[in-house]
Every structure is written in structure tokens, then in C-alpha cells.
Image: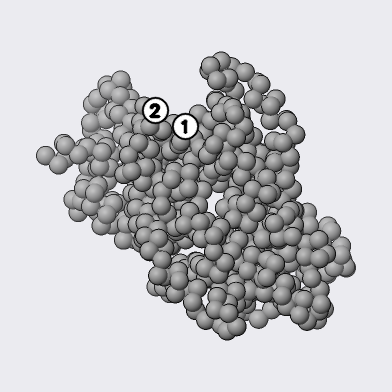
Amino acid sequence: MKQSRLGSWIALFIGTLYFVVPLAGTFEFSLRMRRGEYSFDAYRSVFADSAFQESFLFSCLMALATIVIGVLIVVPTAYWVQLRLRKLRPLIEFITLLPLVIPAIVIVFGYLRLYNSSSFLPMTAEIWSTNLLLAFSYVTLALPYMYRAVDTGLRSIDVRTLTEAAENLGAGWTTILFKVILPNVRTAILSGAFLTFAIVIGEFTMASLLNRPAFGPYLQLVGANRAYEPSALAVMAFVLTWACMGLINVFGRAKQIKHAP
Amino acid sequence: MDRLGCCWRPQAYPLAAYPSVVSGKMTQSQETMAPPSAASRLQLVQSAWAWVGVAPFLIFALMFLILPTLYLIVGGFQDPQGNFTLQNIFDLFTPSIMSAYWISIKVSGASAIVGAVIGFGLAYAVVMGGLPAWIRPTLMTFSGVASNFAGLPLAFAFLATLGRTGLVTVLLVKFFDVNIYATGFNLLSFWGLTLTYLYFQIPLMVLILTPALDGLKREWREASEILGASALQYWVHVAFPILWPSVLGCTLLLFANAFGAIATAYALTGSSLNIITILLYAQIRGDVLHNPNLGYALALGMIFITGLTNGAYIWLRGRSERWLR
């Protein structure tokens, strides 16, 4: 028994080392910009770069659009499947898992062939429609996570009773969806949203191939041309990912406490 | 007005399985009065309306997920004039393309297997290693973060750590007089990429394997101990036969996860390590193969490999669910 516990500590030690050392290395490297002493010059340089501000804002707006479109597509579908089309559940679940099977680069390759400027639906011809296409591509990337989160949330509430009660009180379907169902799965939607944000914010392949000035292509450009800024950006990206996951945990726990007897 | 105009609200078509106190009696009398053909037509209309609810999702999936993929799959079997051909598939077996697939498979395979082994060790340590209780949620949160810390920032982090002037490289020279680059190590290589991928592979393994380990019941171990089994016998005859589908399934997921990745490799190695996603990226950008249809076949090959991996995963999950509920 004693021996097995030692093994556990060793496994944990190796895991922690693997997790912490690259972070420490990155942080240390990001402080090296000024010769001979540590400074935050690399961070200052990043924040002062107007391309950083613009691309980061662009990706934030993209993430927001992705979350809104994703919620509008996923929540009614998951609700409807739960309430009326249970036999469709395997099909819908299969479709939501497809983005894990089809690599992102293949999906965007298909977009470029199917929706290029000389096709029947020339979405890449205009900037606004390319942005829309990019948001749609991000919705497909986030689909497995978003659907799972919402579906789990819907399973934990009594969809049928809530719907019937609302109906008996004379509510229309928009009222049911937006005032009854949405508030009840708010926690699930929020965790799906933060995960979506973490996925979208640094995404490179789709933004780069659709030629949009997002944060991912900007990172690539900095990585290819600068020495210390990339590690500063990596530290910031890590903090951002951490914040997203932390928020998911906070909201998840709040719900658990509320539901505890 | 609302009642008539907005007829896809659920109230508009009460089903037998969905009785409503208010309208139940009326529906019943309607049903007995109406001839069978009308009733079946009503049912048809009802199910048609039910489909309307999932229509936006299905249209979206069709337009932005299924059709683009199908376009490439069909294109992979066509020549530039649009006639059916298997030539593109044969052309995949040229050395340059095969080596790209092969490097991708090797990197994904190595990072999946090593990630699975270390991830298993970690998951096992927190689930039944007798560690303090606070470690498990901490490790889970860490894993959630690290498994999502991929793409370009991950490449930057490893360049800053294990690059030629990275912290670990420098410290090793300073304190142990070991220059890892003199031993032939290179971050911009197969092992370098594998080592980098492990950063998200290990935590992903921890996240997806822990529920399976939770399903390993304490009673089974106790029962085998009471019957006089050694620890080894318990593992060989009880735990392993139950766990292997989960472990192998999770390993396959890690493989697929690494196989489709591009950003990390692109930032880390540029195009010096020609993995399949980087080749496809170059093909999309500039038709480096000088044959668009061969590009489609390239994508088709990727879907084939990830599809096979996921298919095997689903089959294994079905097996593992027999015991682990």
C-alpha cells in the first residue's frame, strides 16, 4: 500500500513538472527582452502594437458572434430533440460529433471550393460574408462542445413539465424558449460559451485560409518575425485559457451548490 | 390570431403521448369522429411540423459541414474534366505524399501512445492512488486548461523552453554541462513535435479516462483479494480486461486529436517537417501539387484515417460500457 502511494506521488510529480516547466520557461523568456535584466518590455511592445489590438478585438467579436449563432442553433435543436424527436437523438449526436472526425483544415478547404467568388453562393466575395462564413466555421468547431454542454443541461431539468406549465399559462413558443428554457440552462450555455471563446480566440487555420485579420494569423506573423513577443503572447494566451476554464468551474460550482439538498 | 398563425407551437398538435388536461377530452372526440385517413394525415402533418424544429440545425449542418466535405470526397474521385477516376487515389501513393501521411501518423501515434501511458498513470494516481482529496479537482482543472492550450501559443512556449536559447536548454548547459542540441535533439523534428503535442495529449487523456477508472468498482478488487489473487492477477484477469477498451478508445481519440492539428506544427517547424496538414495547407494556398483534384484526394485520405479511428473508438466505447456504468 505504501509503495503504491509512492508511485502515485511520482506520477503526479512528473505530470506537474511537464505542466509547469514550459510555463516557467515561457515566462522567463518573455522577460528577457532588455539585455542583462528582466523587464516587461515584451508585453509593453505587444500592447503598443496596433495590429495586436485590432486582431484581438476582431477575434473577440468573432467569438461573440460564434457564441450567439451557436446558441441560437444548438439550444432549440437540443430542446426539440429532448421534447419531441427522441428517435432523432442518435442522428443529431452523430452530426455534432462530425467536427471531431473531419479536421478543421478539411472543412475550410470545402468552404473555399463550395463558396468561392465564382460559385452559386459566393460567400468569400465580400468581407462581411467572409466574416459570416468564418463565424459559421467556428460554430462547427464548437458544435461538439456546445451541444454536449446544452444537452447535459437540458437533461438535468424537466423539459416536458416546464413546457406544459408554460403552455397552460398561455405562453407562445418564443416565450417558452427564451423565458423558460434558456434561463434554466444558462449555466450550461455559459460553460459552452467560455469553451467556445477559448477555442476561437487563437484559432489559426480557418482565419488564415479565409484571409481574415484574426488573432491566430497575427500570432503566426509575430512568431515568425519577433524573438520575445511570442512568449509574452503565449503567457497571455495561457492566462486567457485559464480564465475561461476558471469561469466554467465557477459557474458549474454555483449550480451544484444551488442544487444541493 | 396567434393560435392559427403560429401553428408550430407544441399546443397546436396534442399527441396521444402528450396529454393535456384542458384539451384532452376534445382531442379524443375529434379522433373518434374523424375517418382513419384524416387521422393519419393529421399525424403526418404533426411529424412534419416536428421536423421543422430541427430544420435550422440540419440545414446548417448540411451547408457548412456535410456538403463541403462531400464536395471534396466527390472531387477526389474526379479528373479535372469531372469524369470518374481512381487516378487521384493512386497518386496518393507517391513517395512525397506517402511520407507526409507517414510522418503525421508517426507523430500522432507516438504522442497518443506516450500521452496515454502517462495520462493513465496520472488518472490512476488520483482515482485510486491514495492521494489527498484536494489533488483530484486541482488536476482536473489543470487538465482542462492544458488540453485547451494548443495551437500557436503552445509552439511559442516550447520554443521558449526547449529552443536553442530556451530556459531548459540553457539551464542544462549551465548546471549539468549537457547541450541537448549537441546530442542530436532538435525541437523542429519528429521528437520535438511529439514532445510538444504531449502537452495537450496527457491532460486530455486524464480528462477522458478518469470517468472510466471511476467505474472500476472497489468490490472487484476486494473480491479478488478475498479469493486469494495477487495484485498482478487482479490486473491481468480483472482490471485489464475491463479497462482495455476504454484505454485503447481514449488512445484513438488522442490520435485523431493530433492528426488534424496544424497550427502548432506550422509555427514550430515552418515547413521543415512535412506533415500532412501542412502539405494540405500549402496545397490550398498555392496548389503545390499542380492538381486540384489530388488536393481533394489528400483531404479524402485524412477523413478516411480520422473516420477509421473514430469508428474504432465508437466500437470500443460500446464494449467498455458493458462493464463500466
Q: Chain of mark 2?
A: A
Q: Secondary structure at mark 1?
A: helix
Q: Residue furthest front?
A: A35
Label 1 sits on residue:
A113
Kind of residue at disc 2:
Ser
Q: Is residue A209 left or right of residue B210?
A: left
Q: Could you say where residue B254 lies in the image, as x and y percent from the top left?
A: 65, 53
> Label 2 neighbourhood size at 10 Å, few (<14), some (14-19), many (20+)?
few
Kind of residue at disc 1:
Arg
Q: Secondary structure at mark 2?
A: loop
Query: What residue sits 59% from the left and 49% below the top?
Result: B262
Residue toward you, B223 or B205? B205
Quadrant of the image for the C terminus of chain B? bottom right
Q: Is residue A13 left or right of residue A41?
A: right
Residue toward you, B122 or B217? B122
Residue toward you, B150 or B174? B174
> Label 1 neighbourhood size at 10 Å, few (<14), some (14-19), many (20+)?
some
Residue B32 in the image: above or below residue B268: above
Indicate which disc, 2 or 1, sits on the residue closer to the N terminus: 1
Asked whether the beta carbons under mark 2 and mark 1 sit within 8 Å of each other, the answer is yes
Q: Find residue A119 and name its label.
A: 2
Residue B76 in the image: above or below residue A199: above
Residue A103's image quarter?
A: top right
Q: Find residue B36 and name its label.
A: none
Viewer can see residue B321:
no
Q: Is residue B91 left or right of residue B233?
A: left
Residue A124's image quarter?
A: top left
Q: Could you say where residue A87 lies in the image, as x and y percent from the top left?
A: 46, 39
